[in-house]
Amino acid sequence: MSQGFGLYQLGEEHDALRAAVRALAEKEIAPYATEVDEAERFPAEARDALVKADFHAVHIPESYGGQGADAVSACIVIEEVARVCASSSLIPAVNKLGSQPIILSADEELKRTVLSEIAAGAGISYALSEREAGSDTASMRTRAQLDGDHWVLNGTKAWITNAGESTWYTVMAVSNPNADKPSRGISAFVVHRDDPGFSVGHKERKLGIKGSPTREIHFENCTIPANRIIGEPGTGLKTALATLDHTRPTIAAQALGIAQGALDAAVDYVRERRQFGQRIGDFQGIQFILAELAMKIEAARHLVYASAATTERGEPESGFRSAAAKTFASDVAMSVTVDAVQLFGGAGYTRDFPVERMLRDAKITQIYEGTNQILRMVMARHLLRG
Ligand SMILES: Cc1cc2nc3c(=O)[nH]c(=O)nc-3n(C[C@H](O)[C@H](O)[C@H](O)COP(=O)(O)OP(=O)(O)OC[C@H]3O[C@@H](n4cnc5c(N)ncnc54)[C@H](O)[C@@H]3O)c2cc1C
């Protein structure tokens, strides 16, 4: 074995970060995960613990009071939290999603106002989707009109993660309905929960990630100062989509964490459970399943970190790699959690063990931040553009 060969391994800082987040997650987040799911309540304990340890938004640059952590570190935090509670992992994941448009495109004053609050513990959501504009984001109908020194927003955004818990909302809206292409008529704004005309709707009743509220947000002549626009008018969709290139690795990390949590639980179970006079883990048929799951997780993990590193370096391949990582890792999470339930037999089908929750939680990772069908289109576009 060659010592000191650092290629294809994370550095000591990343390993130390993982150990610290894992310890926190097991002590302060895991004990509430089952109850948070059953009661469909926001994991306030997780938020408080993550904020106290400064793990709630590690990506915020140091110049705004954050940790200035790289994209791989942000993935490690999300992965380790998701390993015990996927709902809680949406706290750091959505803080990155909501703030990335500001990091990419906002002016200095807006960055200073919002990013420093996120670093200090406030939450920020990302509002792109509408009921009738999901995959087809450019067909959105929420409007923004400039009125003197204010923008006035009208419309409804749907499926907004952590709406009602967040203080800030990054919102994409049509500011020029006569633009030559609909995508060029969209601008991005930052809305505060106390802005007049802003309100949140009822909580969606979901299959999984039940501790993370998903709500509509409503704008009825919602009035915000003119300087709350992110970048130039007409650049909002571009910023929103560039953001997703940065955040798809974090959803891939969430999927990876869920899969790892399910495998860990399954390994513990098959070591103990006895049938036909022996531990079921001693049956070769079970060992083949375990090896298959671990192999898929290992492959996903490499793709997740590689894609995050690519976005950190700002390489042109980041769009492809982010889409590939999110698609691959979420498909792995789905298949691993289904097989983990199988390894538990009847017990896996009950709420007495965490694997059925993990199975339900895994499903969303194939749907949000671009469905896996849309992401296959993104990947193909990269291949075909010549
Ligand atoms: C729990 C949850 C949380 C969410 N959080 C957020 C959030 O915080 N912020 C936000 O903005 N959005 C959020 N979303 C919205 C999410 O990103 C969308 O649901 C997703 O992009 C799909 O849009 P849709 O639901 O309208 O499905 P549709 O676009 O109607 O798709 C339906 C099906 O058709 C397929 N399909 C669509 N177009 C094509 C095509 N061209 N080719 C092949 N197949 C196609 C899709 O893959 C899918 O299988 C969230 C959604 C959920 C469920």
Image (cartoon, rainbow, N blue to C red):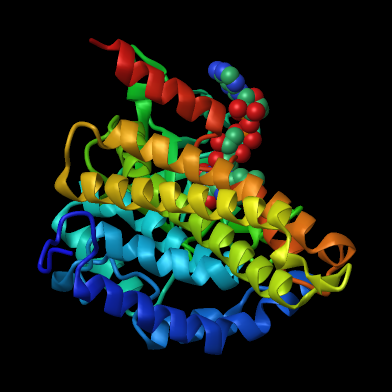
Q: Residue at x 12, y 61 (%)?
A: 5
Between residues 139 and 135, which one lies in front from this camera angle?
135
Question: Which quarter of the figure has residue 52?
Answer: bottom left
Q: Is residue 194 left or right of residue 68?
A: right
> Is residue 145 at all visible to an observer of this figure?
no
Q: Residue at x 32, y 11 (%)?
A: 384
Q: In this view, which residue lies farthest toward the front?
A: 277
Residue 132: give x, y in percent of width and height.
Answer: 64, 28
Residue 237: give x, y in percent of width and height.
Answer: 36, 33
Question: Which quarter of the figure has residue 155?
Answer: top right
Residue 216: give x, y in percent of width and height.
Answer: 64, 50
11 up-or-down from 72: above or below: below
Q: Residue at x 51, y 62 (%)?
A: 257
68 up-or-down from 227: above or below: below
Question: Which quarter of the figure has residue 225?
Answer: bottom left
Between residues 333 and 318, which one lies in front from this camera angle?
333
Q: Residue at x 53, y 66 (%)?
A: 82
Quadrant of the drawing holding the N terminus: bottom left
Q: Is residue 35 left or right of residue 275?
A: left
15 up-or-down from 363: above or below: below
Quadrant in which ligand 1 is drawn: top right
Residue 201: give x, y in percent of width and height.
Answer: 69, 55
Quadrant of the drawing holding the C terminus: top left
> Is residue 4 at all visible to an observer of this figure?
yes
